[in-house]
């Protein structure tokens, strides 16, 4: 496994906990395959936290791009604000 900085490890753990971030996205960004992410999580987390995470992601279709029921796009809540243009504050 490659050498990762503390910040990279923190980001990988954060991405692994996110429901909609796929293992493919982690591999694309950091070059770690799913099994390597699992090993990193096992090494970096408390045993109880690792078991909770493993139970949560096991078989979860949103963590595997091939199992998702949509091909493109992202979920957007109907309550999310619509951005019509960027506002830049001026001094």
Image (cartoon, rainbow, N blue to C red):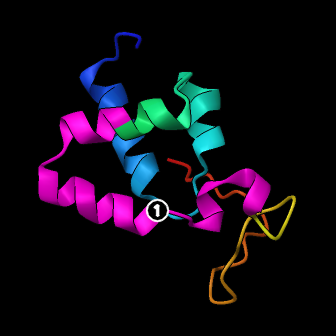
Task: Specify few, some or many for label 1: CA neighbours under 10 Å numbering under 14, 14-19, or 20 or more.
Answer: some
- Residue 24 placed where, x, y %? 65, 40
On the rendered structure, is 5 left or right of 49? right
Q: Quick check: can you spot residue 11?
A: no
Majority secondary structure of magenta residues: helix
Q: Of 74 and 52, which appears nearest the observer? A: 52
Residue at the spot x=59%, y=57% of the render?
63
- Residue 89 placed where, x, y %? 55, 53
- Residue 1 placed where, x, y %? 40, 14
- Residue 5 placed where, x, y %? 30, 18
Q: Of 13 and 47, which appears nearest the observer? A: 47
Q: Of 30 and 49, which appears nearest the observer? A: 49
On the rendered structure, is 3 left or right of 44? right
Residue at the spot x=66%, y=54% of the render?
64
Residue indicated by mark 1: 57
Residue at the spot x=40%, y=57% of the render?
17
Residue 52 colored in magenta in the image: yes
Q: For numbered disc 1, what is the local secondary structure? A: helix
Q: Quick check: can you spot residue 58?
A: yes
**Which range of residues does the magenta coloring cover?**
39-67
Question: Total label count?
Answer: 1
């Amino acid at each position: 496994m490659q050498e990762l900085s503390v910040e990279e490890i923190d980001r990988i753990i954060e991405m692994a906990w996110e429901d909609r971030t796929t293992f493919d996205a982690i591999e694309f960004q950091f070059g770690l395959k799913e099994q390597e992410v699992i090993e990193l999580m096992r090494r970096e987390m408390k045993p109880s936290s690792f078991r909770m995470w493993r139970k949560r992601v096991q078989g979860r279709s949103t963590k595997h791009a091939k199992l998702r029921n949509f091909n493109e796009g992202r979920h957007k809540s109907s309550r999310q604000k619509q951005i019509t243009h960027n506002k830049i504050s001026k001094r």
